[in-house]
Every structure is written in structure tokens, then in C-alpha cells.
Image: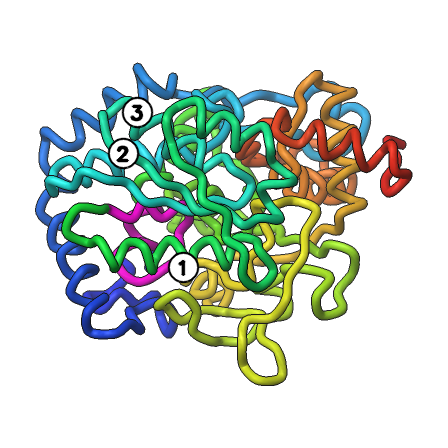
Amino acid sequence: MTTMLPNADGFFGEHGGRFLPDEVIRVVDELAEAYDSVKNTQEFQDDFKRLLKHFSGRPTPLYACANLTKKLGGARIYLKREDLNHLGAHKVNNTIGQILLAKHMGKKKIIAETGAGQHGVASAATAALMGMECTIYMGAEDIERQKLNVFRMEMMGAKVVPAMTGQRTLKEAVDEAIAAWVADAGESFYLLGSAVGPHPYPAMVRDFQSIIGTEARKQILEMEGRLPDYLVACVGGGSNAIGMFHPFIEDEGVNMVGVEPAGRGMTPGDHAATLTCGTPGVLHGFTSYLLQDEKGEPASVYSISAGLDYPGVGPEHSFLKDAGRASYCAASDEEAVKAFFALSRTEGIIPALESSHALAEAMKMAPTLGEDKIIIVNLSGRGDKDVAQIEQMLSDGRITAD
């Protein structure tokens, strides 16, 4: 029903498309034509699969959380271990694909944006591998929260540019990255980190991230002899979630649950739960659900997780919501932190704060379901990058480990 989307104009139902000035349309057209011409060629697919295996270390395992399942009771919880990718997150799946495309197009420079820093780290590493110059835009607020990842980017030769406007987080980093790309489109390639933006980015990022769900589908069939009952993934822009969901879309018995950040509460400015509270609007050249203020401008957002504080969401998620194929809910900072410590203490796995939102929802669901039910959580990244932030918040008394 939905696997052929988007349509020729880049729309997933009523969401997506390209809402851009003519000079930017021309740049995006070049990208779309290049991707269409190369994506299904044997050479491109062989290079992509080779780097996923030998550079990133795929396939990542599907892990049965026996201890956490026993503690909670109810459904069995599995983790798709994207935290075991090279560099510690799912982001490298996409950077490998896009930089291969950039090389095909003859580009010399990579421009990227990042929130939690994992896309920035993956962009820097893949650019270093491919011998390309790399500049990464990151909100000044996020730079403070993710100093370790900033240093990792710089170690691999990338230049990190702070975005100083607005809330100084992911939205502003995207704004500045797009402006830099358009100003130097002849030499530069914009390596967008999530399944957002103008066509063809949402579908292109989804295609590269679908390796997550493709592997998980094969693995659960081998381990359990059947498909899962639930897939659960965190949603900011939505790349890890759509990568997990997409290969299961036609499997009607598999319920798909996206978990957004409820932050400090559901009052405006205290969360980034776009699909839960947003309305259709245009941001960064595409239409989708959007958190907007009374003037129709992108609203202020917040999350404990630097990778989830974005006022928009990928258009395919908006379509899946409208179609009733996926459901979306929100987990608070407090719930995410509890899940962060629960997995660390029961399984010896420290999850990223982003992934902890998905885990928090799975921990709510499992005790309400029978022991014959199966939940797969996409553990989209590891928590090393968040340890200093958690330690500081514990010291300040803003959170507890209980």
C-alpha cells in the first residue's frame, strides 16, 4: 500500500514535496536526478553494502533482553543494536550512502548539520574515509551538551561551526547548513542527517536507513520463526524510526510505535512532540506536521536529548499517522532517564537518551501484554555521548538514578 511512496513530486499523501526558491530547486533537482540514476546500479549497491559491512560493521545484532523482560513481565523485548555500529549510532548508514552519491556527482566538500552530534561524527568519519572536506553546523546550545562529539568531529578533520541564532539548537543548525550549501552548490554536497527536508531527502535517507528494518525482519524470523507484534523507535526527525518501520509496512500484524520527546511537560516550549501536538506546516522546504506558535512560525521546543529537539518531523511519519498505519506517543525526560538507567543496570547496555525514549514506551507496554508477544526496540545509539550530561544533572539534583 505505502512502499511505493513518495510520488513523483515527493509527496507522501499530503506531506513532503519541495517548497523552495527557484535557485534552490535547481540544486535539489540535480541531486534528485543523480540519485535516481545511480541508486539501483550494481556498482553503487555493491559499494554501499561493502562499506556497511567492512567500515560500519553490519549486520548489527538483534538482542533478546532476558533480564529486563523478566523484571518487567509480559512481552519479550528485543533490541536492534544500532549502538554497535561503528561510531555508535545508526547515522553512519546514511552518511555512507550520501557520500557515495556525492562522489558520484563529483562534489569536493561535505556540508552537514547535527543535533546530538552523532550525525556530525558519522559525517566527519565518512568524509575522512572518502577524502572530502567537511563542515558541520551545530547549535551552540547542543555544542555545550555534546562536547565529546564535537571533539570527535574535529579529531577526524571536520570544521564545527556553531549556530548562534534563535534557540541555538538543531533547527538553526539546519538553517545555516542549507544557506552554506546553496551558496556553494557547485562544489558542495549537503548531507542531511534525518528523513526530513525537500524531496528527495526523505525517501533517500529512508532508503539508506532501511537496512535496519531489513536486518531486523530477517533476524526475528530466524530467532522466533515469526514477525514481531510491535516495533518501537524514537522520533525526532525520524530517520531511525522510518528505517526500522519501512520494511514492515506491508505486514499489517506488526504494530509500529514512534515515541517523541514530552520533555518537561506538554505545555508549549517544554516538549518537541510534533506528531502528538503539531499541525501541518512548512519547514526547511517540505510540508509535514509542525509545532507552530500563534504566528505560524516554528515553535520553541525542548528535550533532554539534543537529537530530538526539532519542531518538525519527516513527511513519511506524518503520512503513516494520517493513514493510521503507525501510532505516535511521547515520553518525558523523567521516563527516558529511568529507562536509561534500567537498561544500564539490567543488561549492561548504556543507551543514548534518544533511544531511551523508545525504551521507556516499551517498558510501559511490556507488562500489559502477554508473554507470547514480541517487541523490538530500535536502540538507535549508545549513551557514551550522554554520560557527562547525565552526571552533571545528577550532581545538580535535576534527575535521580532511581
Is residue 245 in view?
no
Which residue is rendered at x = 26% and y = 65% of the image? 10
Q: Does 341 sit above or below residue 244?
A: above
Q: Is residue 292 left or right of residue 205?
A: right
Q: Is residue 252 left or right of residue 99?
A: right
Q: Judge whether residue 232 is colored magenta.
A: no
Judging by the rendered image, the residue that carries numbered circle 1 is 316
**Residue 210 at x, y percent in the picture:** 36, 39
Q: Mark 3 or 1 closer to N-term? A: 3
Judging by the rendered image, the residue that carries numbered circle 3 is 128
Q: Measure the C-alpha gap from mark 1 to mark 2.
A: 31 Å
> Helix, strand, or loop for circle 2?
strand
Is residue 286 in view?
yes
Q: Is residue 121 left or right of residue 31?
A: right
Q: Measure the C-alpha gap from mark 3 to mark 1.
A: 31 Å
Nearest the camera: 57 or 60? 57
Q: Residues within 10 Å of mark 1 (few under 14, many from 20)?
A: many
Judging by the rendered image, the residue that carries numbered circle 2 is 133
Question: What amino acid type is highlighted by mark number 2?
Answer: Glu
Which residue is rendered at x = 58% and y = 75% of the image? 292
Q: Measure the C-alpha gap from mark 2 to mark 3.
A: 8 Å
For the residues labelled 3 and 1, say whether their Cβ atoms are less than 8 Å apart.
no
* For discs 3 and 1, the disc positioned in front in the rendered view: 3
Residue range highlighted in magenta: 189-206
For the residues labelled 1 and 2, say whether their Cβ atoms are less than 8 Å apart.
no
Which residue is rendered at x = 61% and y = 78% of the image? 293
Q: Quadrant of residue 103?
A: top left
Question: What amino acid type is highlighted by mark number 3?
Answer: Ala
**Coloration of the structure image:** rainbow
Question: What amino acid type is highlighted by mark number 1?
Answer: Glu
